[in-house]
Image (cartoon, grey):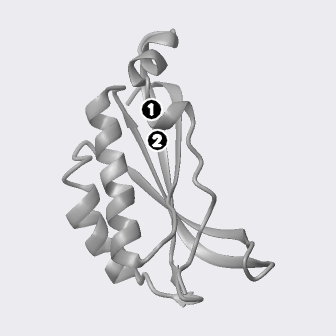
Amino acid sequence: MRSCFWILLVIANLIAPSAALGQALTCAAPQKAMVEVELLFGRNIGGKLGVSETRWRTFLAKEVTPRVPGGFTVFDTAGQWQDAKRKMVVREPGKVLRVFVPADAEMRDKFEAIARAYKKQFRQDSVGVLTRPACVSF
């Protein structure tokens, strides 16, 4: 049985219009306007842990790093969601990937591709995606 993690959350239509998100924010120097993106990944497949740490690291290396070479942060999580078919709460471990990027259409395509790849590779019903404007400095 497929595992569904969190309900797909899309703010501002998955970064579109992404230019408006980045431009609407006025940031004090040295910060600059960017977009914060979080992707929410469930790790269970068929009710048990299916995405091991090794499989996760391989996914990051092959799918995420080439699309987000500037860097990102990953958090281990414990999530839950309502399985409407079985009428029960399902709990599972997960990963949250957080990245700050310039707002543009190419960026949107990269994160859509990451979500598609994860769903296909690990038989997931969804990958949560959250976007929001942010003032950032490094």
Of the pair 43 and 112, the residue shown nearer to us = 112
- Residue sitting at 30 percent across and 41 percent down? 109
Q: Is residue 103 left or right of residue 134?
A: left
Q: Is residue 77 above or below residue 73?
A: below
Residue at horizontal 57 percent and vertical 53 percent from the top: 8
- Seen from the viewer's position, the closer of residues 34 and 105 is 105
Q: Which image quadrant: the N terminus?
A: bottom right
Judge whether 82 appears above or below 7 on screen: below
Position of the C terminus, as image quadrant, is top left
In this view, the mark in front (2 or 1): 1
Q: Is residue 71 above or below residue 3?
A: above
Label 2 to label 1: alpha-carbon separation: 9 Å
Amino acid at circle 1: Ile
Front position in the image: 119 or 101: 119
Residue position marked by numbered label 2 in the rendering: 37
Dot 1: few (<14), some (14–19), or many (≥20) neighbours within 10 Å?
A: many
Q: Is residue 43 above or below residue 108?
A: below
Q: Secondary structure at mark 1?
A: helix
- Please name the residue shown 31% across and 36% down the image: 107
Secondary structure state at the residue bearing disc 2? strand
Q: Which residue is mark 1?
A: 15
**Observer able to see residue 31:** no
